[in-house]
Amino acid sequence: MFFGRYEHTIDQKGRISIPSKFRTTLSEHYDDRLIITNNTDESLSAYPLEEWKKLLSNAPGSFKTEQEREDFQRFVVGGAMECAVDRQGRILIPPVLREFAGLERDVVFVGATNKFEIWNRTKWETALQLARERMQKAKA
């Protein structure tokens, strides 16, 4: 399970070190392959290959319309790229995904149970504040 958040920097080539806690989870429960894809909030989701396969096998039952299925195929599946973890525990995020998420230097990794998210730090801070406000409003 992936949880917590960690700040890292991405180099000019698009390489970034995966947080050690996430690397431990990967090595204990998965292999070294990640599928990284777009999120609707301009961040990236990184799925261990096994979790990606589960997502794809469970997805057909979650669509209410053919349009939802096509949108998922185009945005999530079409945006996905396999990224292997190297010996130093780094991944190379392809330019198209870096551009989509606005990853330039300061990056935040956020655990999301069976996957983790990769955020531009400024966008993460905004999203976190919005989530906090929605949660406070829901409690009221």
Image: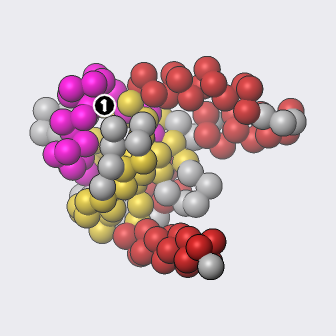
The residue lying at 61 percent from left, 40 percent from top is: 76
Count of numbered circles on the image: 1
Work out which quarter of the rendered image holds the C terminus and state it. Answer: bottom right
* Front-lying residue, 20 or 73: 20
Chain part drawn in magenta: 16-36
Residue 12 visible in the picture: no
* Amino acid at circle 1: Ala
Q: Position of residue 61 (x, y in %)?
A: 74, 26
The residue lying at 30 percent from left, 55 percent from top is: 4
Q: Secondary structure at mark 1?
A: strand
The residue lying at 21 percent from left, 26 percent from top is: 28
Work out which quarter of the rendered image holds the N terminus and state it. Answer: top left
Q: How is the image coloured?
A: secondary structure
Residue 85, compared with residue 22, is above or below; it is above
Q: Position of residue 109 (x, y in %)?
A: 33, 55
Residue bearing mark 1: 84
Residue 48, compared with residue 124, is above or below; it is above
In the image, residue 26 lies in the stretch drawn in magenta? yes
In the image, residue 59 lies in the stretch drawn in magenta? no
Q: Position of residue 22 (x, y in %)?
A: 25, 42
Taking the image as shown, residue 30 lies to the left or right of residue 17, namely right
Residue 77, compared with residue 58, is above or below; it is below
Crowdedness near tag 1: few (<14), some (14–19) or many (≥20) residues, C-alpha within 10 Å: some
- Give residue 88's quadrant in the image: top left
- Give residue 9's quadrant in the image: bottom left
* Front-lying residue, 88 or 94: 88
Taking the image as shown, residue 137 lies to the left or right of residue 13, namely right
Residue 53 visible in the picture: yes
